[in-house]
Image (cartoon, helix red, strand yellow):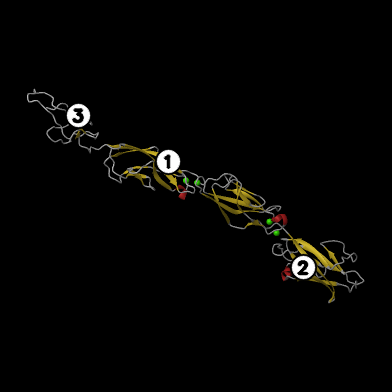
Amino acid sequence: RGRHEPWGRRHHAGPHGHGALPPAPHYQASVAENRPAGTAVARLTAVDPDAGEAGRLHYAMAALFDSRSDALFTMDPVTGAVTTAAPLDRESKSTHVFRVTAVDHGVPRATATVRIVVEDDNDNAPQFSEKRYIAQVPEDVAPNSAVLRVTATDRDKGSNALVHYSIVSGNTRGHFYIDAQTGALDVVSPLDYEASKEYTLRIRAQDGGRPPLSNISGLVTVQVLDVNDNAPIFVSTPFQATVLENVPVGYSVIHVQAIDADSGDNARLVYTLLETGAGFPFAINNSTGWIVVASELDREAVDFYSFGVEAQDQGSPPMASSASVSVTILDVNDNSPEFTQREYGARLNEDAAVGTSVLTVSAVDRDVLPAASCPMQGGFGVPPPDLGTSWGPFV
Ligand SMILES: [Ca+2]
Ligand SMILES: [Ca+2]
Ligand SMILES: [Ca+2]
Ligand SMILES: [Ca+2]
């Protein structure tokens, strides 16, 4: 084209001359967001080949691509100075492109484009991706296991958008650790459902701006899940009971009870009797632990029972423990004294002297209680009460 390009560019200030013009009709400028209206952006001037009194250029600028830009910048038609018309927001639009025209008495003399880049200001705090993060972790989780990852995004740019994470509160026992860069939350020390079923952590996300902006609205709820890690424990062992031998079948003898520190099925206990053979006279209610009489008792046959009881939880795998139970059967006067022989025979000389011993009869009472009212036939009168009683000579 044989001559210099017509455009020169001024950025805020600089030498104003007609020499040393940039070769390209495309210019770039930048301005920070949030500055008040009227902030200088750039100054663009063109060289009028008809320089002189008649060579007075007027400038105009119009948005390319996005008409929203027109309301945000103005260009002084005389000086070519570009200023902001309103505070800018980089997060809604980060670049503005204009076509600039220089007109000489109504005749366009030159055009150029200018691209205005909006520089970031740290005006956005990080925002969490969720209002509340919830994770469920079994209480036997291995230390340094991952729980979840929180994420916060920052609409700014560069270090103004670089987010770091930390735990603000709720980590009083130090069970959790958050990776500042990634937001990954780990369990670092053993959990115990029986001690604490849930943790609520407050997380801070802070950007790298100067000064930084932060957000502490991040909430993480860690729900600890029960694991069957407690065996049942019998209370008040050993269990000892006494029962009258004549109580009816179904009679409740003793309540054995175990407790289990777990929850749900892990603490739901089933009771069984141990070391019991066929015909064993006691049974246990599997769910309540009540031991009842299952068949008639007879102290004279067995006066003491010792057996085991087991409580097993319904965890997977289950845990169990056992205890010993002893039952003493108490006597009831349910036996008549019995003669040791059904018939007694004796031979006696007819001339036997008065007072001669004829024979000895004996009776046995299997009970241990005093049996004062025991009726006897045949006029023997009231026998002494004790077991194995035998009488002296009868005449
Ligand atoms: Ca920010
Ligand atoms: Ca910003
Ligand atoms: Ca447990
Ligand atoms: Ca258990």
Q: Nearer the viewer, residue 13 or 65?
A: 65
Dot 3 or dot 1: first in sequence order is 1
Mark 3 Cα-neighbour bin, 10 Å: few <14, some 14–19, many ≥20: some
Q: Examine the rendering and report whether any part of residue 25 can be seen.
A: yes
Residue kind at label 2, given as amino acid type: Val
Q: Quadrant of the C terminus?
A: top left
Percent coordinates x, y for residue 190 in the rendering: 56, 44
Residue 390's disc number: 3
Secondary structure at numbered mark 1:
strand
The mark closer to the camera, 2 or 3, is 3
Secondary structure at numbered mark 2:
strand
Identify the residue at horizontal 30%, vertical 44% (top origin): 295
Percent coordinates x, y for residue 225 in the rendering: 52, 50
Which residue is label 1 attached to?
322
Residue kind at label 1, given as amino acid type: Ser
Ligand 1 sits in quadrant = bottom right
- Quarter where residue 360 is shown: top left
Q: Is residue 26 above or below residue 317?
A: below
Residue kind at label 3, given as amino acid type: Ser
- Quarter where residue 328 is shown: top left
Cα–Cα gap, marks 2 and 1 = 84 Å
Outermost residue, right direction?
Answer: 2
Outermost residue, bottom direction?
Answer: 106
- Quarter where residue 51 is shown: bottom right
Q: Examine the rendering and report whether any part of residue 234 can be seen.
A: no
Dot 2 or dot 3: first in sequence order is 2
Residue 97's disc number: 2
Cα–Cα gap, marks 3 and 1 = 47 Å
